[in-house]
Image: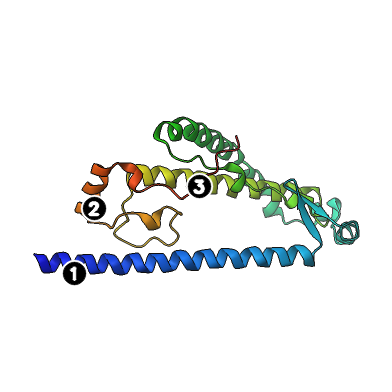
């Protein structure tokens, strides 16, 4: 019995070490991505001003020379693309409802449970309409894609923090891309850890660290 407990403790320690290394590697990767982003801003001559993209005037003029006219764009589209467009854009309704409802949900429930609110603007990023080489339809498409994927990421983070509060237990099988809170969850089948968590209160395992409050 004592040997089994020792083996479990060693396995747990090994898993925690792997998780710590993965977390450190993820932080290093994010720092490198930030450096790469700064290099791209310098290369393509734009900057962020009060959350908005600002290109140098010369770059704006250059981008417009690559813009494809609306008439040429529409007449050159495949018939299948035109016919499926209404189906694609029909998702705007459920996406907007999801956006509204998860926002209402977190403002009610997260405040009651003491969970940090998810900052919507960190997930719903809409900025590609500032690109001068896109025509009006392309800009609309990019706004729609940015909104749709942003809302799904926003809802995923809210769902992840909810899971961290109510059921922070890992799955029996490995998931390909777990949310940010998942790494700190308890191991599948570790009844002792789960009971200790219940006894000590849900704050023992919380959502992804964030001091930011929602911007809505």
Q: Is residue 116 above or below residue 179?
A: above
Q: Which mark is residue 20?
A: none
Q: Residue 146's spot in the image, x, y percent?
A: 65, 49
SS of the residue at dot 3? Answer: loop
- The quarter holding residue 154 reads top right
Task: State the image quarter where residue 3 is shown.
Answer: bottom left
Residue at x 32%, y 66% (from the top left corner): 15
Rendered residue at 35%/68% (across/down): 17
* Mark number, residue 193: 2
Looking at the image, how many numbered discs can be counted on the residues?
Answer: 3
Looking at this view, is 129 or 199 the one in front? 199
**Mark number displayed over residue 7:** 1
Quarter of the image with the N terminus is: bottom left
Q: Is residue 138 visible?
A: no
Q: Along the horizontal axis of the image, is 165 left or right of 111? A: left
Residue at 55%, 39% in the rendered image: 213
CB of mark 1 within 8 Å of CB of mark 2? no
Is residue 79 rendered to the left or right of residue 149? right
Q: Which residue is mark 3?
A: 210
Q: Where in the figure is residue 106, as x and y percent of width and height?
A: 48, 35
Q: Quadrant of the C terminus?
A: top right
Q: Earlier in the sequence, mark 1 or mark 2?
A: 1
Give the SS element for disc 1. Answer: helix
Q: In front here: 86 or 139?
A: 139
Query: SS for tag 2?
Result: helix
> What whole-number distance in Å separates the C-alpha atoms at marks 1 and 2?
15 Å
Q: Is residue 215 visible?
A: yes
> Position of 123 compared to 20: left or right?
right
- Residue sitting nearer the eye, 97 or 20: 20
Residue neighbourhood size for the residue with mark 2, other residues' Cα within 10 Å, grouped as few (<14), some (14–19), many (≥20): some
The disc, 3 or 1, on the residue closer to the chain's N-terminal end is 1
**Residue 82 at what x, y percent from top left?**
70, 50
């Amino acid at each position: 019995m004592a040997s089994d407990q020792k083996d479990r403790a060693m396995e747990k320690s090994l898993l925690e070490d792997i998780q710590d290394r993965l977390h450190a590697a993820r932080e290093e990767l994010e720092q490198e991505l930030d450096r790469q982003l700064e290099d791209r801003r310098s290369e393509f001559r734009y900057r962020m001003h009060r959350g908005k993209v600002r290109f140098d005037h010369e770059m704006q003029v250059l981008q417009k020379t690559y813009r494809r006219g609306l008439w040429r764009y529409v007449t050159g589209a495949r018939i299948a693309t035109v016919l499926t467009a209404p189906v694609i854009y029909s998702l705007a309704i459920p996406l907007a409802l999801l956006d509204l409802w998860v926002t209402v949900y977190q403002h009610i429930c997260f405040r009651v449970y003491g969970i940090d609110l998810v900052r919507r603007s960190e997930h719903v990023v809409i900025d590609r309409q500032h690109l001068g080489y896109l025509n009006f339809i392309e800009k609309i498409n990019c706004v729609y894609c940015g909104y749709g994927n942003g809302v799904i990421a926003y809802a995923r983070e809210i769902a992840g923090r909810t899971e961290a509060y109510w059921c922070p237990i890992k799955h029996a099988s490995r998931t390909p891309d777990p949310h940010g809170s998942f790494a700190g969850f308890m191991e599948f089948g570790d009844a002792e850890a789960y009971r200790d968590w219940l006894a000590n209160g849900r704050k023992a395992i919380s959502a992804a660290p964030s001091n930011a409050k929602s911007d809505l």
